[in-house]
Image (spheres, helix red, strand yellow):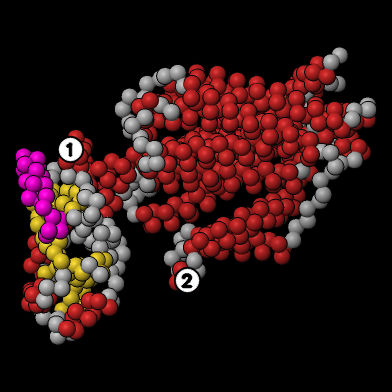
């Protein structure tokens, strides 16, 4: 028998163990391939390289690949743990270290190549369905099925490299163990976990403080004083550590309480809960990891969906008018450009606003506008005018939702002093009048003070021509025409701004990010279900030996089925309950942060994930019970 025959025979003999590893790999590659099919679609060829959409697509592909890598790597580690006894038998029969390495290398490569082939075949079958989903989510036209040769090449190349790397690295995780450790790998009992009130209190404090500080209390004064780049990662790490400790201690505490109840000794309750406690470490680790994956699934979908909620509102905040043309007084093209705007927009029931501001070349981030010009311009924003006396100032922010600074630049203070003015601020507004960030702030002066500064001839003038029209979001052809014929000057003499163009770019970007999140959520959800399934399949032989002895004492198949179903229900739904609780707490924070209602999408997401989790439980429970029962019958 050749070495390759030994490898193949070994795989077929432990087919259930290898099947779990194979299935996990196929799902991960399948998701990456389907995302790549969308990414390389000809209808997206108009996206310019280096644009926000292009970068989002690339970032999405990288994220999907990284999470696929992490999921496959976890599957390999679980797979290697199960194979320890078999490897020990090979060593006992005289296999050298080199032969063990070759065995693992060929097994991993064989499974990897088979998974790549199966995933691409499966992907080609389901690609039309995923393209329809992508079309719906990204709201693009076309997106018909095509032959995705680029996606095939990228998927084969990336995952061939991944499995090649895993095949080289995996032998190093078993080479340091002694033969006796390998042979007894499935006989090692789990260390007993004792309940510790101190650890429970510590875990409760870690989770009880870190979760609110990450969400509903994030705006507390003592928290805002800490840099966000330090605060968020530290609190997240504290939460993750605290959640594991809490899981462990609460699980032990609840099982201890249950064991003291009278109904614990009724029917199959004793076997159900003692089975959970005997593998408390393994069960808690699985439930903890599944909880984190489910939390990631919930928040990825809802957070990225929430980006679509206020796109129109945020566009109006950043561009207060539908169209704006900003021109310096010395701009020789102003008359031509304004004439073109009037000609194109006059037939569309447009509303025209014009105002002039002063700025200093040395301090171009602050602008000055008169009271009358401001009152006229603010009508187009649905705002209210102001009434100012001499030396009174009204401050307007240059960016939305940001309070304007109440201090003047040194250059402007010098000008005020030279003009004999003693200005003081009497009000402020966070609604910018020009594109967000164009000015840092705008200073509204009374007519008298404005004319005084203007006559000093220390400032340059800037004219703003603003237009509002109906159906501004649906005028892409007009936007493209005006952008092509006006655009921006290289020296900053003029610039054309379209709210409709910004809206479409933002909408497309948010839709694309939501699609990326959708694919990542699929990976998280599949990983969560696969982790539980992988843990059950890899322990199948050990569980068979345990229940074979118990059935000899009189346990019926129906009672065994009840025990298995209840234990699986705990493994599936305990993490779901924990993740859902954290999810609803997080939604309180998110809704308060972004505004708008997220209640509908929150409830819909929860219901959808509950259905998926329930279906996963039903499928895994049915298959696992059949597999275990079949082995009990075939192995008397």
Q: Quadrant of the N terminus?
A: top right
Q: Residues within 10 Å of mark 2 (few under 14, many from 20)?
A: few
Pick out the residue farthest to the top: 1
Mark 2 and mark 1 residues within 8 Å of each other at the beta carbon: no
Q: Residue at x 34, y 39 (%)?
A: 508
Residue 360, percent from left and from top: 20, 69
Residue that carries the numbered disc 2 in the rendered image: 225
Q: Where residue 491 sits: x, y (%)?
A: 23, 54
Residue 202 lies, in percent from the top left, at 66, 64
Circle 2 SS class: loop
Q: Is residue 310 above or below residue 434?
A: above
Q: Quadrant of residue 408?
A: bottom left
Instruction: Tell whether position 328 is magenta.
Output: yes
Indicate the secondary structure of the residue bearing disc 1: helix
Stretch of the chain drawn in magenta: 327-349
Q: Is residue 537 left or right of residue 443?
A: right
Residue nearer the viewer, 43 or 583: 43
Residue at the disc numbered 1: 481
Of the residues tagged 2 and 1, which is closer to the observer?
1
């Amino acid at each position: 028998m050749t070495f390759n025959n030994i490898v193949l025979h070994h795989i077929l003999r432990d087919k259930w163990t290898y099947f779990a590893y194979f299935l996990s790999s196929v799902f991960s590659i399948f998701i990456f391939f389907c995302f790549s099919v969308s990414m390389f679609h000809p209808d997206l060829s108009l996206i310019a390289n280096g644009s926000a959409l292009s970068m989002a697509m690339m970032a999405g592909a990288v994220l999907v690949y990284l999470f696929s890598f992490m999921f496959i790597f976890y599957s390999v580690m679980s797979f290697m743990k199960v194979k320890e006894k078999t490897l020990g038998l090979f060593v006992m029969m005289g296999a050298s270290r080199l032969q063990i390495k070759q065995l693992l290398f060929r097994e991993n490569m064989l499974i990897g190549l088979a998974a790549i082939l199966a995933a691409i075949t499966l992907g080609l079958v389901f690609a039309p369905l995923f393209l329809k989903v992508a079309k719906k989510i990204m709201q693009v036209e076309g997106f018909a099925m095509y032959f995705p040769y680029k996606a095939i090449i990228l998927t084969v190349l990336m995952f061939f490299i991944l499995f090649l790397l895993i095949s080289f690295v995996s032998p190093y995780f078993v080479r340091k163990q002694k033969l006796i450790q390998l042979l007894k790998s499935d006989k090692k009992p789990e260390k007993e976990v004792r309940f510790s009130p101190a650890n429970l209190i510590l875990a409760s404090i870690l989770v009880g403080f870190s979760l609110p500080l990450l969400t509903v209390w994030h705006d507390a004064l003592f928290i805002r004083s800490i840099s966000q780049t330090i605060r968020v990662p530290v609190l997240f790490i504290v939460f993750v550590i605290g959640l594991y400790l809490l899981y462990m201690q609460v699980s032990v505490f609840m099982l201890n309480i249950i064991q003291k109840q009278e109904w614990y000794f009724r029917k199959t309750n004793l076997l159900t809960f003692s089975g959970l406690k005997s593998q408390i470490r393994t069960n808690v680790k699985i439930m903890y990891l599944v909880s984190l994956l489910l939390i990631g699934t919930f928040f990825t979908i809802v957070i990225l969906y929430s980006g679509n909620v206020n796109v129109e509102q945020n566009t109006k905040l950043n561009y207060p008018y539908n169209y704006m043309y900003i021109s310096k007084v010395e701009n020789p093209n102003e008359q031509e450009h304004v004439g073109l705007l009037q000609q194109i927009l006059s037939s569309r029931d447009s509303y025209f606003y014009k105002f002039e501001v002063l700025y200093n070349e040395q301090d171009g981030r602050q602008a000055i506008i008169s009271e009358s010009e401001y009152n006229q311009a603010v009508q187009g924003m649905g705002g209210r005018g102001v009434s100012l006396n001499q030396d009174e100032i009204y401050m307007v922010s240059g960016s939305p939702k940001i309070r304007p600074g109440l201090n003047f630049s040194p250059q402007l203070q010098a000008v005020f002093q030279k003009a004999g003015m003693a200005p003081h601020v009497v009000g402020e507004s966070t609604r910018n009048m020009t594109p967000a960030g164009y000015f840092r702030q705008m200073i509204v002066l009374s007519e008298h003070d404005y004319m005084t500064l203007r006559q000093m001839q220390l400032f340059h003038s800037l004219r703003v021509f603003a237009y509002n029209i109906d159906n501004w979001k649906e005028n892409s052809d007009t936007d493209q025409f005006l952008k092509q014929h006006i655009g921006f000057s290289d020296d900053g003499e003029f610039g054309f701004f379209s709210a409709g163009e910004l809206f479409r770019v933002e909408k497309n970007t948010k839709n694309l990010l939501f699609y990326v999140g959708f694919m990542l959520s699929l990976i998280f959800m599949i990983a969560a279900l696969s982790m539980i399934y992988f843990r059950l399949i890899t322990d199948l032989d050990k569980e068979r030996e345990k229940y074979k002895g118990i059935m000899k004492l009189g346990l019926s198949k129906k009672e065994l089925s009840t025990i298995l179903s209840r234990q699986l229900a705990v493994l599936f739904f305990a993490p779901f309950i924990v993740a859902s609780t954290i999810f609803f707490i997080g939604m309180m924070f998110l809704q308060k942060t972004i505004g708008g209602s997220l209640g509908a999408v929150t409830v819909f997401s929860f219901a959808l994930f509950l259905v998926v989790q329930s279906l996963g439980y039903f499928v895994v429970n049915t298959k696992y019970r059949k597999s275990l029962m079949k082995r009990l019958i075939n192995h008397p």
